[in-house]
Image (cartoon, grey):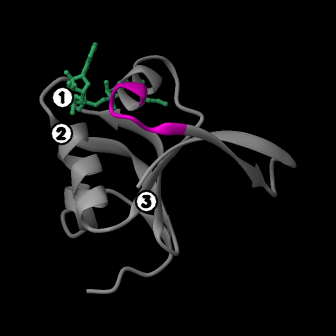
Amino acid sequence: MEIPDGLIEPNKNAPFGFSLDFFYGYLWKEKNSIYLSLIISRYPGKGNFKKLVNSILLSGFTCKVPNPLFIMKYILEKWGFKKTYEYVEIAGEDVEVYTKK
Ligand SMILES: CC(C)(COP(=O)(O)OP(=O)(O)OC[C@H]1O[C@@H](n2cnc3c(N)ncnc32)[C@H](O)[C@@H]1OP(=O)(O)O)[C@@H](O)C(=O)NCCC(=O)NCCS
C-alpha cells in the first residue's frame, strides 16, 4: 500500500509497526525518506525502536532523525547513521539530521 507523504501518527494501523502500544512521537514521510521525531519508547531496552528502524530500512526508505539527543545519538552512531545537515524553512537554518539508507 502506498504511504502518502506527511504526518504518520502512532496507531494500530500505522506503517512500520509504529503503534501507540510502543511509542510516543511521530513520523513524517517525504518522498523516499521517513523522519523520526521526538520518539519515546514506552518500554525502553526491549528492542522496539530497533524493530521500527529496521522495518523502515527494509521497506526501502531512508531513515532520518533530526536533532537526536543523548542516548538516541549514541544508538544511531552505533548503527552507522551519518550526520548530515538539512535546511529547514521554518527554522531558517541548517539542522543536524542523522541518516541511514
Ligand atoms: C532512545 C529510545 C527511543 C530507544 O528506544 P528503545 O526501544 O529503548 O531501543 P531498543 O530497545 O530497540 O534498543 C536499541 C539499541 O540501543 C541499545 N540501548 C537501549 N537503551 C539503552 C541504554 N539505556 N543504554 C545503552 N544502550 C541502550 C540497545 O541495546 C540496542 O542496541 P543493539 O542494536 O546493540 O541491540 C529510548 O531509549 C527512549 O525512549 N529514550 C528516552 C527518550 C529519548 O531520549 N528520545 C530521543 C529524543 S531525540
Q: CA distance from mark 3 to mark 1?
A: 25 Å
* Quadrant where the C terminus is found in the figure: bottom left
Q: CA distance from mark 3 to mark 2?
A: 18 Å
Residue 80 on image: x %, y %: 39, 35
Q: Which residue is mark 3?
A: 62
State the residue in front, 40 or 84: 84
Q: Amino acid at mark 1?
A: Tyr
Q: Amino acid at mark 2?
A: Asn
Q: Who's the residue at 40% across and 31% down the image?
A: 76
As helix, strand or loop, the secondary structure at mark 3 comes to strand
Let me know if residue 17 is in the magenta part: no
Residue 88 on image: x %, y %: 76, 53
State the residue in front, 44 or 31: 31
Q: Mark 3 and 1 residues: CB-CB less than 8 Å, in contact?
A: no
Label 2 environment density (alpha carbons within 10 Å; few <14, some 14–19, many ≥20): some
Label 1 beta carbon less than 8 Å to ligand 1: yes
Location of residue 79 (image quadrant):
top left
Q: Which residue is mark 2?
A: 48
Q: Residue furthest right?
A: 92
Location of residue 42 (image quadrant):
top left
Q: Can residue 25 be seen from the camera position used here? A: yes
Location of residue 81 (image quadrant):
top left
Quadrant of the image where one finds ligand 1: top left
Residue 93 on image: x %, y %: 84, 44
Q: Identify the magenta region.
A: 77-82
Residue 87 on image: x %, y %: 77, 52
Q: Which residue is mark 1?
A: 43
Pointer 3 or 2: first along the chain = 2
* Quadrant where the N terminus is found in the figure: bottom left
Q: Who's the residue at 52% across and 31% down the image?
A: 68
